[in-house]
Amino acid sequence: MINLGSLFGKSSPPLVGLDISTSAVRLVELADAGKGDMRLERYASEPLPRGAIVDGNIENIEAVSEAVQRVLKKSGTRARLVALGMPPAAVITKKIILPAGMSEDQLEVQVESEASQYIPFALDEVSLDFDVIGPAANSSDDMEVMLAAARREKVEDRVAVAEAAGLKATVMDIESYAARAALEPAIARLPNEGKDQVVALFQIGAQATHISVLLGGEAVYEREQPFGGNQLTQDIARAYGMSFEEAETRKKAGELPENYAADLLAPFLESAALEITRAIQFFYTSTPYTRIDQLFLAGGCARIPGLLEIIGSRTRIPSSVASPFAGMQLAPGVREHQLKAEAPAYLVACGLAKRRFG
């Protein structure tokens, strides 16, 4: 069986989480602070050149590995083991029911047999992994197993990037699973520890918004929409005659002309609110669910001034910005003020870093 890099397994410490997104490489290293607590040791990000990642595919391995080398140097980490993420669209997942009590070898054979029914590729082109979730709900003689598969070259591209930067990939996760793992503490702070809460997570990135709706910590709905912060950056570049890179830098630094807020930011916020309200309505009409109890914003765009307020106002759902590091201890080198502004972009990287602890 071709393994997806211990997708569901534990990892040996020390390990860093490395999120390779469309616009940047982000690194997080966590440590055990004792008594079940975690400490944020270090975090860093490095922008990627446009076109290095397209639709989740690595188009320029050299450029991405160079960015990884820079982010390693910037962070100061000495860890050489890394957990990587695969975009949800690149991974096929399926829950299957199998007879309980199988040996590991029997289980592998059975999983391969089942996988061939659900995967539209030849098995020798695929990296495959599985995890026994537990007893099946309706039969004590059966067990529920999660199957995950991805095209082998997509896994190998990410491993190649890590190796070119001197790292060893020991865990390959799915980005949406990592985001959920990072969000767990925030959900646990909701009423009844979030057990009966319908929670929507909107991760607004550079090119796309990934939507996950969770109940009891389990995903009941996932979808991706082609809307992201690059739209605002392109508007800035056009309006002020800048390159895309300069527009992005000045957007983040808040160094734009006075008319920016009224002429460009306000229409972008309106578009974002419209995208999110439409996504929520689509969720209601295409599922049995009729409510969302809490909405979380994450991703690089989550901290855009005014975004949280307009979304809370338009959706009339309690809304907050997700910080994956809330409640964690911070290492002496971590600047708390800077972290607060940047934390929502590190949801996936933090979830990957948590794999150090199993």
Image (spheres, helix red, strand yellow):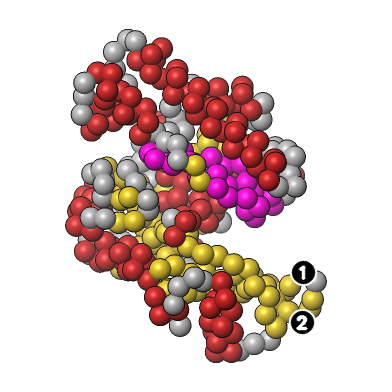
Q: How many marks?
A: 2
Quadrant in the picture for residue 301: top left
Structural crowding at the residue carrying mark 1, measured as other residues with C-alpha within 10 Å and reported as few (<14), some (14–19) or many (≥20): few
Give the labeled residue for mark 1: 137
Q: Residue 133's spot in the image, x, y percent?
A: 64, 70
Q: Is residue 201 magenta?
A: yes
Instruction: Name the element at disc 1.
Output: loop
Left or right: residue 21 compared with residue 178? left
Quadrant in the picture for residue 352: bottom left
Q: Which mark is residue 146?
A: none
Type of the residue with mark 2: Asp
Type of the residue with mark 1: Ala
Where is the N terminus found, in terms of image quarters? bottom left
Residue 189 at least partly seen: no
From the image, give the main secondary structure of the stretch colored magenta.
Answer: strand
Residue 157 at least partly seen: yes
Left or right: residue 218 compared with residue 85? right
- Rendered view: 354 above or below 152: above
- Rendered view: 135 above or below 87: below
Q: Residue 41's spot in the image, x, y percent?
A: 38, 50
Q: Nearer the viewer, residue 207 or 202?
A: 207
Residue drawn at (24%, 31%) of the image = 244
Residue drawn at (38%, 39%) of the image = 206
**CA gap, disc 1 and disc 2:** 10 Å
- Rendered view: 233 above or below 6: above
Q: Is residue 294 magenta?
A: no
Give the labeled residue for mark 2: 141
Residue range in magenta is 197-223
Left or right: residue 68 compared with residue 147? left
Residue drawn at (57%, 76%) of the image = 117
